[in-house]
Image: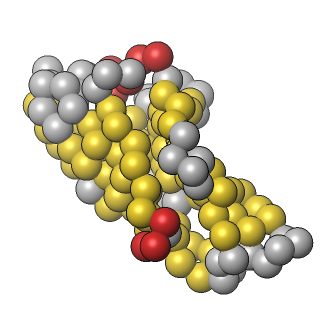
Amino acid sequence: QVQLVESGGGLVQAGGSLRLSCAASGSIFRINTMGWYRQGPGKQRELVADITSGSITNYADSVKGRFTISRDNAKNTVYLQMNSLKPEDTAVYYCYADVRRTFYQRGDYWGQGTQVTVSS
């Protein structure tokens, strides 16, 4: 199996910064896209940012210019640097990975979620 373990959430004041990390472990042949989603109170889960194995990035309009996604392929880890945080960024942030366990077996995996709370 494959496990994704997130870290780095917490409480921060508006304008502050946080860095999320997500490490994948287990039976991994190759990781394709990795990314971060979030789900705020009373809202649907939405894509924040994702990054391909070739480091092509994609961001939600609401976070462009404030958040930066990156990855370390050697460590099977993805990061999300969040700057200029706003109260509307408050949500549970979930790590996601598109993983090939073997050449033929592919699946989508999710972390357990980490809470980010931005106070005004």
- Residue 104, percent from left and from top: 88, 72
Instruction: Name the residue located 25 percent from the left edge and 49 percent from the top edge.
Output: 19
Query: Image height check: is 24 above or below 90?
Result: below
The residue at the far top in this view is 61
Observer-nearest of 95 and 76: 76
Q: Is residue 102 above or below residue 14?
A: below
Residue 25 or residue 45, whichever sits in front? 25
Q: Nearer the viewer, residue 27 or 54?
A: 54
Residue 86, position in %: x, y? 24, 22
Residue 81 locus on image (x, y percent): 28, 43
At 42% from the left and 63% from the top, the residue drawn is 72
Residue drawn at x 37%, y 53% is 79
Residue 77 occupies which quadrant of the picture? Answer: bottom left
How many numbered callouts?
Answer: 0
The quadrant of the image that shows the N terminus is: bottom right
- Relative to 72, residue 62 above or below: above
Quarter of the view holding residue 99: bottom right
Residue 119's spot in the image, x, y percent?
16, 28
Task: Name the image quarter holding the C terminus.
Answer: top left
Residue 78 vertical placement versus 27 (above, below)? above
Image colouring: secondary structure
Give left or right: position of 86 versus 72.
Answer: left
Q: Is residue 36 left or right of residue 84?
A: right
Residue 42 in sight:
no
Residue at 66% x, 83% y is 27
Residue 72 in view (yes/no) = yes
Furthest toward the right, the residue is 104
* Residue in the foreground of this view, choosing between 14 and 58: 58
Left or right of 67, for residue 99: right
